[in-house]
């Protein structure tokens, strides 16, 4: 007769809003890179380098110019990231095996996709205002929107273009968010699990940084074409983009590489943003998370 001994250990799990807080904190550091990425993506027929573009912004607006749209960026993270992280974390905790083993990768990817879709929809209005505020300086003075902050931008769009305009580009935002969330969250958890199973890594900051850096690279590659199309759709004037197909066609006419415009600043921005987000998230989990007992069976 086999005797099964059950040991009970404790682990800490995240609260639903930790992801939004961690992403907002990371955005405070990486916003200048996001601004440069947006301005590169809206170039048509031009190929100004990130270094040159940085010089132009600093020359024309000073250091503060690199933080144009920061209020919209923070609002975006507090809506978009709170929703996608919250849904993913809560669903993952519901489906997690009782013995503490991680959920299968395909289940994780499915849950991340659901969270990403919801986050993309909820965060689209703030994302639209964020893109416009970051790109405003490139427009001629008479064409600038001059939003004072994120709330003023939301009000102006709703008042002058209609409430539904706040969800311009929502299909691409949601598509990008699905890919982004799978690339970041699912791959982060999978990579972290594989690293911890080796004798070289433990559940510490080194593992969190390594896992998030790799996940950031995967997420950037998966989302860049959709990100370019989303940015152009959001920055377009009413009626300028007739359909997603025409937008894809016009972008493809520039060259296949046009879908990857801004890839370097996107990765340079997303990699540290992903690293900081998960480092902050793990610290919140380890220090302020909910304690959960885990049953470990030993034959």
Image (cartoon, rainbow, N blue to C red):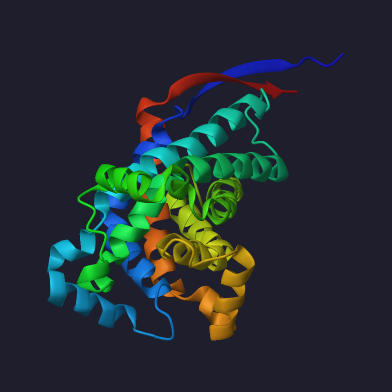
Placement of the N terminus among the 4 image quadrants: top right
Residue 39 is situated, as x and y percent measured from the top left of the image, at 34, 71
Residue 13 is situated, as x and y percent measured from the top left of the image, at 49, 28
Q: Is residue 26 left or right of residue 87?
A: left
Look at 34% across and 50% down and name the residue there. Answer: 160
Q: Nearer the viewer, residue 299 or 211?
A: 211
Q: Nearer the viewer, residue 171 or 70?
A: 171
Q: In the rendered view, tell whether residue 51 sits above or below residue 240.
A: below
| Residue 205 seen anywhere in this rendered image of the structure | no
Q: Nearer the viewer, residue 228 or 50?
A: 228
Placement of the C terminus among the 4 image quadrants: top right
Look at 54% across and 46% down and name the residue there. Answer: 185
Q: Nearer the viewer, residue 112 or 92?
A: 112
The single residue placed furthest to the right in the displayed view is: 1
Look at 52% across and 43% down and name the residue there. Answer: 121
Q: Is residue 98 left or right of residue 17?
A: right
Q: Is residue 175 left or right of residue 74?
A: right
Residue 9 is situated, as x and y percent measured from the top left of the image, at 54, 21
């Amino acid at each position: 007769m086999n005797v099964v001994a059950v040991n009970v250990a404790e682990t800490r799990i995240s609260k639903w809003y930790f992801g939004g807080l961690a992403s907002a904190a990371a955005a405070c550091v990486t916003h200048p890179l996001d601004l440069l990425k947006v301005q590169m993506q809206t170039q048509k027929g031009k190929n100004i380098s990130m270094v040159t573009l940085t010089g132009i912004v600093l020359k024309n607006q000073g250091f503060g110019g690199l933080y144009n749209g920061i209020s919209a960026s923070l609002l975006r993270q507090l809506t978009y990231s709170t929703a996608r992280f919250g849904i993913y974390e809560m669903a993952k905790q519901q489906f997690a095996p009782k013995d503490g083993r991680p959920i299968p990768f395909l289940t994780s990817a499915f849950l991340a996709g659901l969270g990403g879709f919801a986050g993309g929809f909820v965060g689209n209005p703030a994302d639209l205002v964020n893109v416009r505020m970051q790109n405003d300086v490139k427009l001629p003075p008479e064409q600038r929107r001059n939003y004072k902050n994120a709330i003023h931008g939301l009000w102006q769009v709703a008042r002058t273009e209609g409430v539904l305009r706040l969800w311009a580009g929502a299909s691409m935002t949601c598509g990008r968010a699905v890919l982004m969330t799978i690339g970041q969250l699912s791959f982060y958890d999978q990579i972290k699990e594989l690293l911890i199973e080796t004798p070289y890594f433990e559940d510490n900051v080194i593992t969190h940084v390594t896992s998030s850096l790799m996940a950031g690279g995967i997420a950037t590659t998966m989302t860049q074409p959709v990100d370019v199309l989303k940015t152009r759709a959001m920055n377009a004037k009413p009626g300028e983009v007739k359909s997603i197909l025409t937008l894809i066609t016009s972008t493809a006419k520039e060259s296949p590489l046009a879908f990857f415009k801004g890839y370097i600043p996107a990765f340079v921005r997303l990699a540290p943003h992903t690293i900081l987000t998960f480092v902050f998230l793990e610290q919140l989990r380890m220090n302020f998370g909910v304690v959960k007992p885990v049953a470990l069976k030993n034959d």
